[in-house]
């Protein structure tokens, strides 16, 4: 029998107090665990205030979340100097952890026209650090996984959210699109990929440097994946010329890309971004329909704009751009508005 959310919280409290040192447990047993912002997964976070600072108690249900991967990747990144939360205690069977508290300041909240160059410079340097990790223990970002992620787009965005028919000619064209994107992704040089490296998973720490969270899904895959997650963020958009200037800076410093023709790198960047944004359109839709999380619906228009931009920019993808203009764009905003009204009733 699956425990209720309150039962899980009580179990987490009991485990956390036992995991603290005797002095901490004595001083803090009466304190509450304060919920802090969650994420798109099934993890829940609670702040524990201790005399010397605070820790986060993490509830990561083992049936949906992989605490072992979190601990392993944390060690991998920390060894290369990346600022990640230290894991103070973990119970893999229950899915409970005590980790460093990086505070509440998301990079998203700190970004503006004046700060963006500095913060993106720091973030791109972190990607370079991440890609110095040896990927031996990480799964590959395989053809099968790339395709599986792309399938989320027609299933949840096109069919469930928009109510479109994705069989027949449309289905064949989607298969053609997915083949193009997957083949191009596999052409890229490979390195360690955080896989969700964006402004809500980077924390501004007290010294002004950036801490990295939510890295348990790391893989060995296309080296431009994290750069596009950051620079074409679903939660904040920048002019194309700014994005390309940051990309050029990244490529110039990248040992695997600095000698590659920029147009080739740009295509790799745009097309792996298209793969990611199609997946995100599906995920944001699935979070509402399957997981009852409507807070990601407002991110769909900006994500769709990225998709349209890339499809219109490359002749090979124009067939999908035409279909999006004819079949998706005219109904998208009305569908999102209607869905959001449902959530308010």
Image: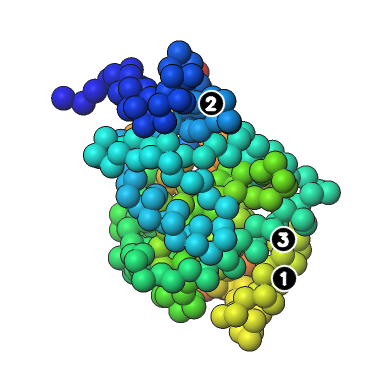
As displayed, is residue 231 above or below residue 110?
Answer: below
Q: Earlier in the sequence, mark 3 or mark 1?
A: 3
CA–CA distance in space, label 2 to label 3: 34 Å
Looking at the rendered image, the quarter that the N terminus falls into is top left
Q: Which residue is mark 1?
A: 249
| 35 displayed left or right of 313 | left
* Residue 27: % across, % down: 48, 19
Along the viewing direction, whichever of 185 and 196 lies nearer the viewer: 196
Q: Decide: marks 3, 1 in contact (CB < 8 A)? A: yes
Q: Earlier in the sequence, mark 2 or mark 3?
A: 2
Along the viewing direction, whichever of 152 and 103 lies nearer the viewer: 103
Give the numbered dot on residue 105: none
Q: Which residue is mark 3?
A: 121
Give the numbered dot on residue 50: 2
Q: Secondary structure at mark 3?
A: helix
As displayed, is residue 10 above or below residue 143?
Answer: above
Residue at 72 percent of width and 70 percent of height: 249
CA–CA distance in space, label 3 to label 1: 8 Å
Q: Decide: marks 2, 3 in contact (CB < 8 A)? A: no
Residue at 63 percent of width and 40 percent of height: 106
As displayed, is residue 53 above or below residue 196?
Answer: above
Q: Nearer the viewer, mark 3 or mark 1?
A: 3
| 239 displayed left or right of 151 | right
Q: Is residue 267 visible?
A: yes
Quadrant housing residue 60: top left
Question: Which residue lies most toward the left here?
Answer: 1
Residue at 50 percent of width and 52 percent of height: 196
């Amino acid at each position: 029998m699956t425990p209720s959310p309150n039962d899980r919280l009580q179990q987490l409290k009991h485990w956390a107090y036992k995991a603290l040192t005797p002095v901490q447990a004595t001083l803090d047993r009466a304190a509450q665990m304060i919920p802090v912002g969650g994420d798109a997964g099934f993890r829940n976070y609670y702040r524990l205030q201790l005399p010397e600072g605070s820790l986060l108690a993490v509830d990561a249900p083992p049936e949906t979340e992989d605490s072992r991967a979190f601990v392993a990747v944390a060690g991998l990144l920390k060894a290369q100097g990346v600022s990640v939360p230290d894991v103070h205690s973990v119970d893999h069977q229950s899915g409970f952890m005590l980790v460093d508290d990086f505070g509440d300041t998301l990079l998203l909240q700190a970004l503006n026209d004046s700060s963006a160059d500095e913060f993106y410079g720091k973030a791109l340097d972190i990607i370079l650090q991440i890609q110095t990790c040896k990927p031996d223990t990480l799964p590959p970002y395989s053809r099968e996984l790339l395709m599986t992620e792309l399938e989320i787009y027609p299933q949840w965005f096109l069919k469930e959210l928009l109510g479109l028919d994705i069989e027949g000619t449309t289905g064949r064209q989607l298969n053609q699109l997915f083949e193009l994107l997957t083949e191009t992704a596999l052409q890229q040089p490979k390195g360690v990929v955080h896989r969700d490296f964006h402004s809500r998973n980077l924390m501004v720490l007290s010294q002004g440097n950036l801490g990295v969270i939510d890295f348990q899904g790391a893989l060995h895959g296309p080296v431009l994946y994290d750069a596009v997650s950051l620079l074409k963020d679903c939660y904040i958009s920048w002019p194309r010329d700014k994005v390309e200037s940051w990309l050029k800076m990244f490529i110039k410093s990248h040992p695997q890309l600095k000698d590659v023709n920029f147009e080739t790198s740009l295509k790799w960047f745009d097309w792996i971004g298209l793969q990611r944004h199609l997946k995100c359109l599906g995920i944001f839709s699935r979070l509402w329909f399957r997981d009852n999380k409507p807070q990601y619906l407002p991110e769909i228009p900006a994500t769709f704009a990225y998709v349209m931009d890339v499809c219109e920019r490359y002749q090979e993808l124009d067939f999908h751009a035409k279909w999006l203009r004819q079949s998706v764009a005219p109904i998208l905003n009305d569908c999102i508005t209607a869905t959001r009204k449902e959530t308010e009733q």
